[in-house]
Image: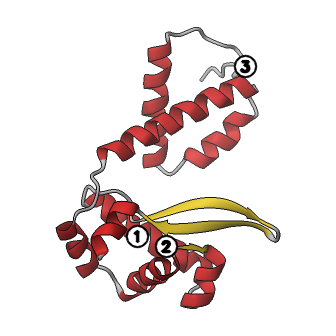
Amino acid sequence: MERRDPKIKVEVESEDVDSLCSRLYTELQRYGALKQFIKYSIGFMDADSLKDIERTILRRREEFERWLRAWDKESVRKYLKNLSPDAKKVLNTIVERGRVTKTELIKVTGFQPMKVAGVIAGMNNMAKKMGYRPVILRESIRLESGRDIEYRVEESFLENMK
């Protein structure tokens, strides 16, 4: 197999690049190899190329999230009925506090860090399988003590919980 120099640039149409990035993103996500690909690729790219890729990935994520439906009362009721006790504990904690960091969530629930992440991932996967937006939104934040993750409940879900 011939190995090409990754620094050689090939000129392609803008639409072809978007389509290629979209397909590549989908396949790498499917096989769980996105992080490894990004780490490998960064060594071969300049800052402009990285910014182009970031814009394409963000655009793709926005397209996907627009496709997902907002929550309604009936869908929230069905979703809550199927939640595990651990997921209910996490959801109730976030709802009560509005926004909560991962560190606070670990303290309140008594769960290990991996369990908190797993429960939230499971909650969001269940929502996506139902065709709705993720229930728990996450944002990386910077604190004096370092970095943490802040969680909050998606607006349409929260409105229809009441």
| Mark 1: amino acid | Gly
Q: Residue at x 17, y 69 (%)?
A: 74
Q: Residue at x 49, y 73 (%)?
A: 118
Left or right of 40 in this view: 129:
left
Q: Nearer the viewer, mark 3 or mark 2?
A: 2
Q: Are marks 1 and 3 in contact (CB under 8 Å)?
A: no
Element marked by disc 2: helix
Residue behind mark 2: 118
Residue behind mark 3: 7
Q: N-terminal of the two: label 1 or label 3?
A: 3
Element marked by disc 3: loop
Left or right of 117 in this view: 107:
right
Q: CA distance from mark 3 to mark 2?
A: 38 Å
Quarter of the image with the N terminus is: top right
Residue behind mark 1: 122
Q: How many marks?
A: 3
Q: Nearer the viewer, mark 1 or mark 3?
A: 1
Give coordinates of residue 18: x percent, y percent.
47, 23
| Mark 2: amino acid | Gly
Q: CA distance from mark 1 to mark 3?
A: 39 Å
